[in-house]
Image (cartoon, grey):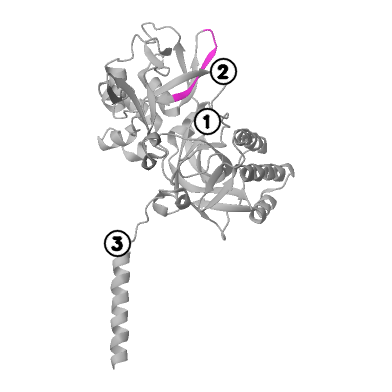
Amino acid sequence: MKKVRKFFTLALVLLILATFLSCHPFRKKEAQRPEEALKQVHFFFPKFSDDMDRESLIQGVRRNIEYLDRLAPETVFHYGPHNFSCQQVRESQEAFLDLLSRGLDAEQLSREIRKKFRVYRATGREGNGRVLFTGYYEPIYEGRRVRDEVFRYPLYRLPSDLIRIDLSLFGEKFKGESLVARIDGKKVQPYFSRSQIEGEKVLDGKGLEIAWLKDPLDVFFLHIQGSGRVRLPEGKDLLVHYQASNGRPYRSIGRYMIDKGFLAREEMSMQAMRRYLTEHPEVRDEVLNQNPSYIFFQQVETGPWGSLGVLLTPGRSVALDPKLFPKGALGFISSRKPLVNDHNEITGWIEFSRFVLHQDSGGAIKGAGRADIFWGSGPYAELAAGHLQHEGDLFVLIKK
């Protein structure tokens, strides 16, 4: 009888525990360290099929090797729980180029990768393995080198009073930390916010203007993209690229517009935000100033450039969190991309997968569950970058 009671007591405890867990599931925290961001795959590998041409992939990998060649061979990269030297990463990507040169089909390539490469999967948001993919592109906006009545919104170069303070000089506990600031008398102050720069015009008259655009929304979205082209009247493009930020935190104006009821979550896109703010200029400054971050540009001869100092490859370069994912990593992604008709309208979304390279970073791309795809320039790139907000999978590869 005692055994029966013990059995029923245990069964009751298990039932209560199961009920509790179903109502209150344990939520894994999102990765805080590199070893938590990637988990090695031992079974259930993806099929490594690629929807793009191999020439672009070869180009992207070769640009990646340019970055690796600038580093000391013993430089350490963290691939989840494992560490590899720069030399090992370089040899891995050379080995991948060798595989590509053999003309293997998707099935043969998948088999070779499973045999010769370690495959890691991003743990994603809250450790659920799902990664939110967004996109960015290289915009082209009409502009002038000299201000006039129409073109009166500036793109600024880096101000001389903006300084970066390396906090690690003040103690081991500040290792890897820094501050962007300005000196005001004997005080160290945060650098000016967006509202101070654009509303109070604190940088006017300092000769910092690279070019002038005709719409403040052009300026804002160029800040978001990080690089772009200013089309001058003589037909020449002026290429501008991110040089620094004011150190203020990036805040999403899209989230603010949803919270204020300006846009519904299901209709949110870069195009929808721009349309609303164009039609409601009375709230434009209020919305834009919700993001205190401000970008300073430099003029470049070629571009766009990623944060690794290599030219980005459309469709192949991605921005990830460099604190969690190894810079220059060879990756593989699967998500969804838009189908577009002859009128440049999205008619649907289809699954896609491809090899990519971690060659960039972004103020909004934080955590193990975020990835930003560089789509290039042109109408399709703008549509894909503006509307992509789909979950998918992210894998990272390195030779065994």
Percent x, y of residue 209: 41, 12
Reading the image, the residue beneath label 1 is 306
Front of the two marks 2 and 3: 2
Quarter location, residue 180: top left
Q: Magenta stretch?
A: 234-243
Q: Residue at x 48, y 24 (%)?
A: 227
Examine the rendered structure and indicate whether residue 12 appears above or below residue 213: below
**Label 2, label 1: how many angstroms apart (C-alpha)?**
14 Å
Q: Residue at x 74, y 45 (%)?
A: 102
Of residues 272 and 360, the one nearer the viewer is 360
Q: Does the residue at mark 2 contact the one at mark 3 (Cβ under 8 Å)? A: no
- Helix, strand or loop at label 1? It is loop
State the quadrant of the N terminus. bottom left
Looking at the image, is mark 2 or mark 1 earlier in the sequence? 2
Q: Amino acid at mark 1?
A: Gly
- Helix, strand or loop at label 3? It is loop
Reading the image, the residue beneath label 2 is 301
Percent x, y of residue 275: 36, 26
**Label 2, label 3: how many angstroms apart (C-alpha)?**
56 Å
Percent x, y of residue 196: 28, 20
Q: Does the residue at mark 2 contact the one at mark 1 (Cβ under 8 Å)? A: no
Reading the image, the residue beneath label 3 is 24
Q: Amino acid at mark 2?
A: Glu
Residue 181's tag is none
